[in-house]
Image: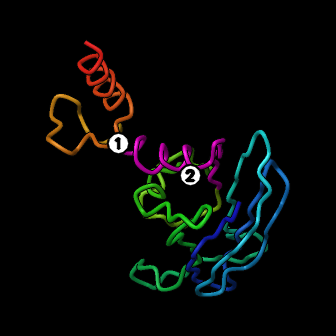
Amino acid sequence: MKFKLNLTGSKCNEYPRLTILHNQQVVYSELIEESAEVNLDIELQKDNQITLQGIDKSQGDNGKWDTQIDTNGQIIADKWLSINNIWIDNISMGPEWIKSLTLVNNSGTRQFLDGAWYDNGSINFSIEFPLLDWIIYEKFIKLEQNTIVAHDARSGERKFDYAYIQEKIKAIQKLIND
């Protein structure tokens, strides 16, 4: 499987680090200097847990801070990392899917709403077989299920609602067979 990320990093003292693990094995770990494109070939297995870890931000350790604040309390320099896009087998997962990911850090968990890390944390997701079915589910069906309320759906808004589509196919098959 081809796995590609387009990233932007901003430094304060040093650039952020991104570490990518596949089934708890490090497959990438580098500093992201301004903008970067990470291309990996990952051999899929029965189970495929992907973990994105970042950003190695210092919180005053050894007197080093990765956020600078002016006298008015405004941030003037900060260390952060942003995921602009993720491609899996050359298919863009898109910003909505990235925003649906969950970031786990010392403060707990939160949605990855702006696609950026401002503190240390990790994102985990599992890739399943068949790969194309998983991509369709993650990119279209799951996102639509989270945004469309069935009784409010207008024509075309349920185009990726698999259960709804299956019901319609069965109804059409019944009409044909009768």
Is residue 166 within the magenta segment?
A: no
Residue 176 horizontal side relative to residue 94, left or right: left
Q: Position of residue 94 (x, y in %)?
A: 45, 63
Q: Please, what secondary structure does the residue beneath circle 1 have?
A: loop
Q: CA distance from mark 1 to mark 2?
A: 26 Å
Query: Hey, what amino acid is under mark 1?
Result: Phe
Query: Hey, what amino acid is under mark 2?
Result: Leu
* 69, 125: nearer the viewer: 125
Residue 39 horizontal side relative to residue 81, left or right: right
Q: Nearer the viewer, mark 1 or mark 2?
A: 1
Residue 69 horizontal side relative to residue 52, left or right: left
Vertical arrangement, residue 175 with respect to residue 119, above or below: above
Q: Which residue is mark 1?
A: 160
Q: What colour scheme does the image use? A: rainbow
Region of the chain picked out in magenta, as a range: 122-143
Q: Which residue is rendered at x = 51% and y = 66% of the image?
A: 116
Q: Which residue is rendered at x = 31% and y = 22% of the image?
A: 173
